[in-house]
Amino acid sequence: MGAGHDHGAEQMSDGRLVGAIAVNGVLTVAQIVAGVLSGSLALIADALHNLSDAASLVIALVARRIGRRPADRLMTFGYARAEVVAALINLVSLLLIGIYLLVEAVGRFVSPQPVDGWPVVIVAGVALAVDVATAVMIHKGSKHSLNIRAAFLHNVSDALASVGVIIAGVLILQYQLYIADLIVTAVIAAYVIWQGLSLMPRTVRLLMGAVPEAVDYDAVVDALRATPGVSHVHHVHLWSLDEHRHALEAHLTPEVATLQEFDRLKRQVKAMLAERFHVEHATLEACLSDAPDTALRGCEDAHHHHHQGHRHVHAH
């Protein structure tokens, strides 16, 4: 990342992630044991959600460490996208867990089983406290990291799920309303699936090299064309290197005659892109077949490469 960035994800120490992983791991084991002994599917559902949180935190921790590695001959842009890959893994696992819980809830509805309410209420109460503590621990890093934000949302949803499990336990104790356990399970599963689906599009866009969500492609092209000294723009490619860094490459037809003048124009264009669109990495090529300076010659036909089988976005 650029030296001028001060992201909360970087400020948050790895120790907080390790601590969050530890408490979630212990809680998951306790919830599974209590769920099996009490017969509460809702408690097991909450445990599996906690397990996915612990796993996502482990993946996020590993990805952060990989992402800090400098660029090399294999990854010339660096390893920052490791966190995006980790996010995709976490989201897919969330969806699988949510589907599994829905299937189990339907099975329990067909063949109901008795549920012991007290272990459900006690363990869910402990889980609620741990979920809130974990969310507080990682909140600082959730503002600028897709992975850590997903983990933070998971813990918030865990806290809400624990409240639901407590309500189910109370209804079982007071009214023997065992169906409440299945309803809460279905709600938790639906929320888990919704979480996964809500974050999936952005994750896939980052991995596919799509135009960044916060950047208007047409506005970028218009700004390039409006720059004094630029007469034409084509072959514009705009993508994200990672969550926070954007890159662009474009072919410009300049209204200058020498390489030195084009260098000045490039500096002007790059400054504009950085200031207006937060594009930190820009590669600009001159396209002027009849330029006096042979260094400016190239890209003789804006359509030539397209007809050779290369698909480009043309900004005429």
Image (spheres, helix red, strand yellow):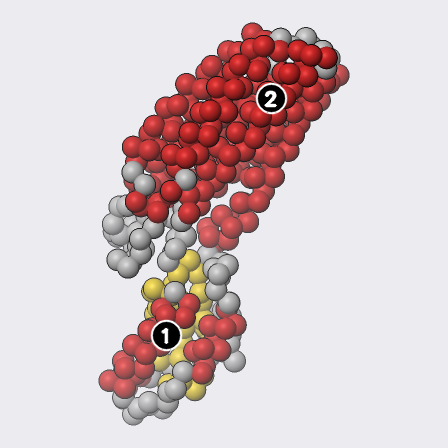
Q: Which mark is residue 186?
A: none
The number of numbered discs placed on residues in the rendered structure image is: 2
Q: Which residue is drawn at 32% across and 48% down?
A: 79
Residue 6 position (above or below residue 158): below
Left-right relation of 267 to 169: left
Q: Where is residue 69 in the image (x, y as percent from the top left)?
A: 26, 46
Q: Residue 277: which quarter of the image?
A: bottom left
Q: How far apart are marks 1 and 2 (CA)?
A: 53 Å
Residue placed at 49% from the left, 78% from the top?
A: 222
Secondary structure of the residue carrying numbered label 2: helix
Q: Name the residue under label 2.
A: 165
Spot occupied by residue 85 in the image (x, y as percentages of width and height): 43, 43
- Evaluate whether residue 41 shows in this view: yes
Q: Give the foreground label among 1 and 2.
A: 2
Which of the image's four quarters has the N terminus? Answer: bottom left
- Labels 1 and 2: the sequence-earlier one: 2
Taking the image as shown, residue 264 lies to the left or right of residue 197, namely left
Residue 265 or residue 161, whichever sits in front: 161
Tell me the amino acid under the disc marked 1: Met
Q: Mark 1 points at which residue?
A: 272
Q: Residues within 10 Å of mark 1 (few under 14, many from 20)?
A: some
Vertical side of 313 occupied by 37: above or below: above
Q: Provide residue 221's location: percent of width, then percent of height.
A: 48, 75
Residue extending farthest right: 110
Q: Residue 265: x and y, percent?
A: 32, 82
Label 1 element class: helix
Is 172 located above or below residue 55 in the figure? above
Image height check: is 295 above or below 28? below
